[in-house]
Structure formats: C-alpha cells, structure tokens
C-alpha cells in the first residue's frame, strides 16, 4: 500500500463544473498536507496547504482534511480549462522531515 | 527572485557515464530535496537534507549520492548512469518540515 494514494484518474469535467480530487494517507504521524498543481512539462507549484481538520477555502479552491479518516480532498469550483493539469497530494511528517507524494490525478476541463 | 535553480536543464548520457546535477536556492531554506519523476508517476524522493550538514536516504537512493555543499547548494551525483535512471529530476527546498516545498524547473536526463 502506498503511503499516499489518490484517485487514479484521469478526471474529466465540463467547464464551470466542480472537480473533486481525493487523497488518503496511511502515516498517522502526518501533520501537514499540501496540494500541488503540475502543468505538463513544468514543475509542481503549491496551490493549497491545510494543517487542521475542516475546510480551507482560497478563491475557487477548497481543501478538506479529516485526520480521523486520514483523508484529504481538493474541490475546484467553476472549473476552467486553465485548471487542466495534474494535481499532486502530499503528506508531511514533521518528525521525519520530509513529504510523501501521491502519484497525482490528471484533470481535464473541457470547454 | 531566482528561487530554486537547477542545472543543467537537459542532459543526455551514455550508460556508465557519471554526472552531477546542481541545485541552489536563494531563500535561506534549511531543507532541500531531490526527487525523480517518471512518466505518469508522482514524485519519488531520492535523498534529502533536513539541514546543512545532514543528508538522508529517501525512497529510491540506489545509484545516487548527494552532497549538501552549504546551506544554499545540494548536488546529486550519478556515479555510473543506467538507462533506468532516465527521468526528470526535481530539486526542492523549504524553510522547515511542515512547510510547502518550492521546486526548481527540473533536469530532463536521458541515458542511452
């Protein structure tokens, strides 16, 4: 079992719809969680971080964390074609000093 | 603001050749990381340095060595390149664990 697992994808949604990306993690020592966006041929860039249970909203993006269920999600509202990318979930164990990344979910937003 | 700078951006090697990938950050970050990313895959940690003077193995360290030259620079060395090491290599840094990482643009390495 991978330490961080994401929806296998690919995920395709129409423009304007809500895209839902899911991630589960196995290390209960994980304390910080991140969503990175990676366009094809580019490096990952941070879009959301979340550290405590509940929801965190930033513009069209909402991250949700449930530590009891070891589950992290990212919702993208009013999806745009420019949101088409691979989204990487990462769980960070502060004591270990490193993050573990999932394999990513590729999202395509169709005009 | 350069952030994380990786050199070279592209490289083609023959099997058995050696080379060093360079990474430097100008954000005064303590922790630095080397990842590889194969097509359709996530990031796999090769080595990391939680602070200047320390290095630790990640998930896939075999065939690689690293040097944390100073706080700014963290290099990755392939002593005897193999075709299985063909990949995109990313260097990243962060101020400390629990903070998000900043990535360089990557080095695209092909080994024939």
Image (tube, helix red, strand yellow):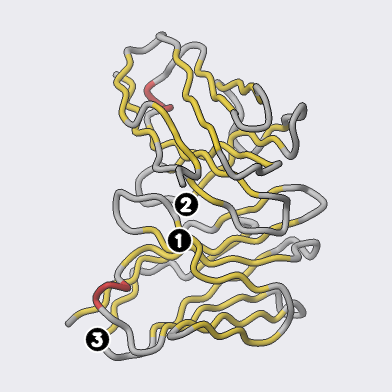
Residue at numbered disc 3: A15
A84 displayed left or right of B42: left
Residue at 65%, 42% in the rendered image: B28
Measured as percent of width and height from the top left, residue A57 is found at 55, 85
How packed mark 1 is, by other alpha carbons closer than 10 Å (few <14, some 14-19, many 20 or more), is: many
Picture quadrant where residue A55 is located: bottom right
Q: Name the residue nearer the viewer: B70 or A41.
A: B70
Task: Spot the residue most to the left.
Answer: A111
Q: For mark 2, what is the residue?
A: B42
Residue annotated with mark 1: A104
Residue A52 percent across, percent down from the top left:
74, 78
Rendered-image quadrant of the C terminus of chain A: bottom left
Viewer-nearest residue: B12 or B3: B3
**Dot 2 lies on which element?**
loop
Whether the residues at callouts 2 and 1 have beta carbons within 8 Å, the answer is yes
* Secondary structure type for disc 1: loop
SS assignment at label 3: loop
């Amino acid at each position: 079992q991978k330490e961080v697992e994401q929806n296998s994808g690919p995920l395709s949604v129409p423009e304007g719809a809500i895209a839902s990306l899911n991630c589960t993690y196995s290390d209960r020592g994980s304390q910080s969680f991140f969503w990175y966006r990676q366009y094809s041929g580019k490096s990952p860039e941070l879009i959301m971080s979340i550290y405590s249970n509940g929801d965190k909203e930033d513009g069209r993006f909402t991250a949700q964390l449930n530590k009891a269920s070891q589950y992290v999600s990212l919702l993208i509202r009013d999806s745009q074609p420019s949101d088409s990318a691979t989204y990487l979930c990462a769980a960070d164990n502060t004591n270990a000093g490193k993050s573990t990344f999932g394999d990513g979910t590729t999202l395509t937003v169709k005009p | 603001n350069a952030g994380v700078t990786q050199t070279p951006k592209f490289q083609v090697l023959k099997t058995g050749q050696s080379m060093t990938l360079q990474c430097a950050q100008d954000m005064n970050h303590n922790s630095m990381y080397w990842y590889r990313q194969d097509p359709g895959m996530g990031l796999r940690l090769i080595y990391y340095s939680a602070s200047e003077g320390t290095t630790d193995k990640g998930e896939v360290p075999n065939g690689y060595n690293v040097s944390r030259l100073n706080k700014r620079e963290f290099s990755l060395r392939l002593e005897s390149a193999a075709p299985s090491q063909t990949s995109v290599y990313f260097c990243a840094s962060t101020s400390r664990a629990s903070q998000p990482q900043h990535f360089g643009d990557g080095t695209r390495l092909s080994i024939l």
